[in-house]
Image (cartoon, coloured by chain):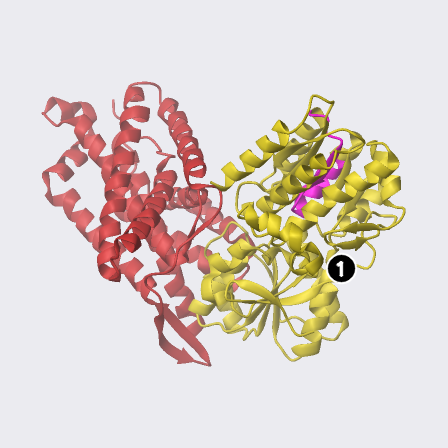
Chain colours: A yellow, B red
Amino acid sequence: MRKMYGAIAVAAAMAATPALAQIKIGSAGPMTGQYAAFGEQLRRGATMAVEEINAAGGVNGQKLELLIGDDACDPKQATAVANKMVSDKVAFIAGHFCSGSSIPASDIYKEAKILQITPASTNPRLTDEAIKKGNTTVFRTCGRDDVQGMTVGTYILKWHRNYRVAILHDKSPYGKGVADETKKALNKGGLRETMYEAYNDTDKDFTALINKMKQARIDMIVLGGYHTAGALIIKQAREQGLGAQMVGFDSLETAEFAQLGGAATDGVLMSFPPKAEDDPKNAALVKKFRDAKYNPEGYTLFSYAAIKVWADAANKAKSIDAAAVAKQLRTGKYDSAVGSLEFDEKGDIKNPVYDIYVWKGGRSFQAQK
Amino acid sequence: MAYFTQQLVNGLALGAIYGLIAIGYTMVYGIVGMINFAHGEVFMVGSFIALIGFMICAMAGISSAPVAILLVLLIAMSFSAVYGWAIERTAYRPLRGSFRLAPLISAIGVSIVLQNYVQLVQGARPKPHVSLVSGGFTLFTSDGFDVRVTWIQIMIVMVTVALMAGFTLVISRTALGRQQRACEQDMKMAALLGVDVNRTISLTFVIGAALAAVAGMLFMMYYGVIDFFIGFLAGIKAFTAAVLGGIGSLPGAMLGGLLIGLIEVFWAGYFSSEYKDVAAFSIMILVLIFRPTGLLGKPEIEKV
């Protein structure tokens, strides 16, 4: 059914376009597979942005056409999607979701001179390596894992200095990256983790790992991974009698996390940028999403903002050429649904902020700082 | 000791599920001599049917857990049995006389079809299910470590033991079992002596699919989450279990399943979760080097 809404929205967007030459743009992420909840966030945000831009006259007088790419968070499939986008001649891509997808795809977009703005890939390597390779057309509307790891590390050091901490990661560039950044922050603050382990994100049975933590008397689990494994780990931890608190990162931010984990997710902490959907400034926009029977959770508005910001810059530059738009993006501030964005040389946003949230009753709320 | 016991309990529950799926592989191999690679997907389909069954029960207002479980068990087993029958009839029987690899390829095709079919009709998202059998008890405590046993783990092991016992009886005591054993030994000769080979093979697929459905339902109740992709990994593990125990041997499949479950859990418990699958497959390779027919397998006699 959800797919149908999307299809109708895309069809509506296309039906509304006149015979003028169109600009093709792409949105790519895990539309299927374990992380499809996040793919939907990206797709919903992108669809809404394109609809609004077209209703307001398009970019440089041309209407946009949105293509959706499904990478299933698989690096191999991500490069296939990127190649498909290249052959479809998109001018701009808002994606991908997983860092493990965005990083390999970024090389392909660079070759084809396609501007890339990821709404959600937080691994520092994406922009750090891009700039080293001379790729100046990669941007993101989200923060970075070094900031995120620092936020979580500082929080643990402030409130739970005496806890015995287990750091887990799923071996993905995102999961391991953010876990290592947190480890760095904790170690710097004088807290040594009791355990550091990797798991397979396709597993369903985590009982062995949980009992290892139970044996080591772990008080806090730092989870460098996505919501599907996180939900299973916390649920099985409670069943196995491990009372440790879990702290995760931005990839827990979907209602599906609480649906999969049930009551066990109450009290789970996570870091996330200030929630744009709760910002009164976005009330009208949020209502539009809710009227379309979708709660713009997590990265929905980041995806929306990525396309809006690109359209703004393209209008200002009076061009859709990647280099010209990139240059434009680096000058001045862009007012967006996720706050006023200013991009630095690497394409990261300046002064990214992360807050700590706590899950309760299927929703996440801002926690005490 | 407490830690060891806890890992043992968890390993047994996991192994029992693998064992139930492995029976399907081993039975089909024993009689037809082919690997039914679609069997993992039948397990996945079974778990989805069970999920739908539980939702129907909830809508029909059946609030008693045992009644709902029994009802859903029957629904899942019978629907999956139809799947098993249909797969054999459409994808394998027409290829029975053909060269050895043909049904294997056909099986992989069926597996892809089933996976994509479920993805299309049920969506690509993981499906959660509220656990009907929740809670458990503390077996004993030592050095501050509570050994927890959950009711669902007990249910998994009991259902598996009951099905194994019932199944062994079917094979050794009933006419169907006799026909299956006859087909296993020599299909042509069995046919000459009046055994309906087609019917026997069909029933083998039906039974295997029903057992996979039970495993699917237990899996769903144990972990509370299923998706269209669970059949792949579970199928590979169960196939490994069947090979480890000696493909073609029923007690071997169960033993293999338990061993794979225990190896995984103990490896993750004492070494690292990262390489637990590597450990399971390495041990299988070692066993096959020293016992090419698996632990309980009989050496295949070349039929002339």
Residue A353: % across, % down: 75, 62
Q: Is residue A369 left or right of residue B156?
A: right
Q: Residue at x 67, y 34 (%)?
A: A79
Q: Nearer the viewer, residue B83 or A206?
A: B83
Q: Nearer the viewer, residue A167 or A291?
A: A291
- Chain of the residue displaying label 1: A
Rendered position, A180 above or below B17: below
Magenta residues span: A88-107
Is A91 colored magenta in this rendering? yes
The answer to which of B22 and A348 lies nearer the viewer is A348
Callout 1, which amino acid? Asp
Q: Report which residue position mark 1 lands on.
A: A146
Whole-percent x, y for residue A344 in the image? 86, 51
Q: Position of residue A162 (x, y in %)?
A: 65, 80
**Crowd class of label 1 (few under 14; some 14 to 19; many from 20; radius 10 Å):** some
Quadrant of the image for the C terminus of chain B? Answer: top left
Measuring from the top left, give residue B221's x and y in whole percent.
35, 56
Residue at x-position 12% and y-position 28%: B195
